[in-house]
Image (cartoon, rainbow, N blue to C red):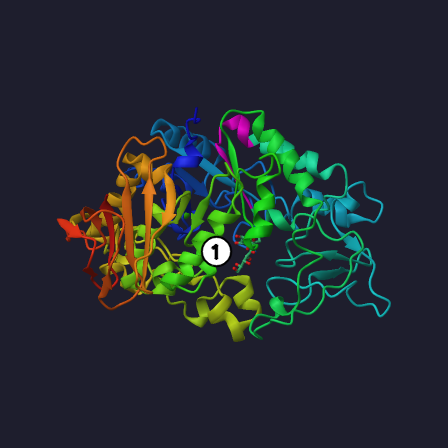
């Protein structure tokens, strides 16, 4: 009766930030042939799909999220042949490849925008969002850019402002114009015809803006840090009309076999669920970023997981994300000692996990000296660069202990400095150490792949009678295979746990330290500091 789960419903997604993964030609920038050289590593992680951040031609004002040509490959990353070869090799290994689609905005160097800005009566003028100045000559309204300053830039030649919610070089497409979405659907078909398995869709919840350009109201809960948050973005985000666009995008995917899209959406759970679509006809999955934003405390996470589970429509595929190229790394956010607990959580919760490259090593944010800061929000707003800057989580992958960590040749200059700890935290060193984070990650992903309870089973929270411990059971729905109790100590202190009603003894299948084994009496036992256990019931 139950349908076989599809690859994106049971698998693990691994995000590669191509600039930072592997540089094959020593120009300091990671590239497609570099990724191809690392497929053995990727396969050894037991992941199922690779998601590549943008690889399109781009002037790189936002490191590729400013796309100048949706159907090309940036020469920095390689050629279309390199892409085709990578795709074929990924598929030959039984893996899937997802690419980043950035439909909300283009680069100002995209041919469409070049035409649009050339004159007010150009046929592509209204492919972008142009507006007359306010009566005082200033911006049309109070909309702000995520990256600091107004979301409007004045174009002298034609006397109007254009909208950009990110850098000024990222003008936003106008999806109220009837020709824009069809053009983007053609872009999707181009890549689907090549054989890509799906898309991660950038800022999908921003794709359509208020038709009346109303001012946004102040945010009474603003913490005073990032000026972008000083207003409530009720006219630039999550507009009701966006769902119709997404349904049309989904229809393109549905004309192919087993392709998927996962939407980048930062919203509370009640609003997030709408992006599955009333008939599961929108995103296959709207990204669930709540673990990134949550206070790292066992009861808080328990409440968060339960509220997600409760909000999910029946039959929806859940998903969990611990980090991405916009967020400080998990080991930096919760501490190196908690990183294993965090990964055990990610990989044993119900739903598709996404791992950001380097998390399998427990990589931490790199230290970026002020002269190296490149990320636009940090460059534009130096006073809060240490909070909002995204360079630290984008430092090169740490492959070995050589100069430049094996990312680039020893004489190259990587585009961002390698993190300080690369001599000990790297793939080569961790490969040799049986209890390393890397080998722990592999054990976890192997177990998740082998056990139906973990990749498709049910979730039930359990009372551990200790506020620092999160406990839950994963049970195989069909009743075949083993069931597991997961216990996670969110604190740096030993914790007493007492679990009733689950039988008396259980067997440890995997421990975060890769050492604790044996049987455990559930009535009363101690979890070591920062310890997580997977127990067979
Ligand atoms: O991110 C959109 C986005 O919402 C982020 O800017 C986020 O709010 C911020 O980093 C703080 O969490 C996407 C891409 O992931 C990002 O890299 C791009 O810069 C942005 O869109 C524009 O394309
Ligand atoms: Ca390179």
As rendered, which of 70 and 456 lies closer to the eye? 456
Query: Can see residue 60?
Result: no
Rendered-image quarter of ligand 1: bottom right
Q: Residue at x 68, y 45 (%)?
A: 242
Which residue matches tag 1? 290
Q: Where does residue 316 sit, x and y in percent of width and height?
A: 51, 39
Up-down relation of residue 290 to residue 316 (above or below): below
Up-down relation of residue 343 to residue 226 (above or below): above
Q: Secondary structure at mark 1?
A: helix
**Which quarter shows the C terminus?**
top left
* Left or right side of 114 for 200: left
- On the image, which quarter does residue 332 sit in? bottom left
- Would you say residue 200 sits in the magenta stretch? yes
Q: Where does residue 274 sit, x and y in percent of width and height?
A: 61, 45
Q: Residue at x 23, y 64 (%)?
A: 496
Q: Seen from this angle, which residue lies furthest front?
A: 501
Query: Can see residue 98?
Result: yes
As rendered, which of 309 and 138 lies closer to the eye? 309
**Which quarter shows the N terminus?**
top left
Q: Which residues are magenta?
A: 191-201
The residue carrying mark 1 has its beta carbon less than 8 Å from ligand 1: no
Packing grade of label 1 (10 A; few <14, some 14-19, many >=20) is: some
Count of numbered tags: 1
Q: Seen from this angle, which residue lies furthest left?
A: 518
- On the image, which quarter does residue 70 sit in? top right
- Would you say residue 505 sits in the magenta stretch? no
Up-down relation of residue 186 to residue 213 (above or below): above
As rendered, which of 174 and 483 lies closer to the eye? 483
* Left or right side of 374 for 458: left
Q: Where does residue 417 sit, x and y in percent of width and height?
A: 37, 62
């Amino acid at each position: 009766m139950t349908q076989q789960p599809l690859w994106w419903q049971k698998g693990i997604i691994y995000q590669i930030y191509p600039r930072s993964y592997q540089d094959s030609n020593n120009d300091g920038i990671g590239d497609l042939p570099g990724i191809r050289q690392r497929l053995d590593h990727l396969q050894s992680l037991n992941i199922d799909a690779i998601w590549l951040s943008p690889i399109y031609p781009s002037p790189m004002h936002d490191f590729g999220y400013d796309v100048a040509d949706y159907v090309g490959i940036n020469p920095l990353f390689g050629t279309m042949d390199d892409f085709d070869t990578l795709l074929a090799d990924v598929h030959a290994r039984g893996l899937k490849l997802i690419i980043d689609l950035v439909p909300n905005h283009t680069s100002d160097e995209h041919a469409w925008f070049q035409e649009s800005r050339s004159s007010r009566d150009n046929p592509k003028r209204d492919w972008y969002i142009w507006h007359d100045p306010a009566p005082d000559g200033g911006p049309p309204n109070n909309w702000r850019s995520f990256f600091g300053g107004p979301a409007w830039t004045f174009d002298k030649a034609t006397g109007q402002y254009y909208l950009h919610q990110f850098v000024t070089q990222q003008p936003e497409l106008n999806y109220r114009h009837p020709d824009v979405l069809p053009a983007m659907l053609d872009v999707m078909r181009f890549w689907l015809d090549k054989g890509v398995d799906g898309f991660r869709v950038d800022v999908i919840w921003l794709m359509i803006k208020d038709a009346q350009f109303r001012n946004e109201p102040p945010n009474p809960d603003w913490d005073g840090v990032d000026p972008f948050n000083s207003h409530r973005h009720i006219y630039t985000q999550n507009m009701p009309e966006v769902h119709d666009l997404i349904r049309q995008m989904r229809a393109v995917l549905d004309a192919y076999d087993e392709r998927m899209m996962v939407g980048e959406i930062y919203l509370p759970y009640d609003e997030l669920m709408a992006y599955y679509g009333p008939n599961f006809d929108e995103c296959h999955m709207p990204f669930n970023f709540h673990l990134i934003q949550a206070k790292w405390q066992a009861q808080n996470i328990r409440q968060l997981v339960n509220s997600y589970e409760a909000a999910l429509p029946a039959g929806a595929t859940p998903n969990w994300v611990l980090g991405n190229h916009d967020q400080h790394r998990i080991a930096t956010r919760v501490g190196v000692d908690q990183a294993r607990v965090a990964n055990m959580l990610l990989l044993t919760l119900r739903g598709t996990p996404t791992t950001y490259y380097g998390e399998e090593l427990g990589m931490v944010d790199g230290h970026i000296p002020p002269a190296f800061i490149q990320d636009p929000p940090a460059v534009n707003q130096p006073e809060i660069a240490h909070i909002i800057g995204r360079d630290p989580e984008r430092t090169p992958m740490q492959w070995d202990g050589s100069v430049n960590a094996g990312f680039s040749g020893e004489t190259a200059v990587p585009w961002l400095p390698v993190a300080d700890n690369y001599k000990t935290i790297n793939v080569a060193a961790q490969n040799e150490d049986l209890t390393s984070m890397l080998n722990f990650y592999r054990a976890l992903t192997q177990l998740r792949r082998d056990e139906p309870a973990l990749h498709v089973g049910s979730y039930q929270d359990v009372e551990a009678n200790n506020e620092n411990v999160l406990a839950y059971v994963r049970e195989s729905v069909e009743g075949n295979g083993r069931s597991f109790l997961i216990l996670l100590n969110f604190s740096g202190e030993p914790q007493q746990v007492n679990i009733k009603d689950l039988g008396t003894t259980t067997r440890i299948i995997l421990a975060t330290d890769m050492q604790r084994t044996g049987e455990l009496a559930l009535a009363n036992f101690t979890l070591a500091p920062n310890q997580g256990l997977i127990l067979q019931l």
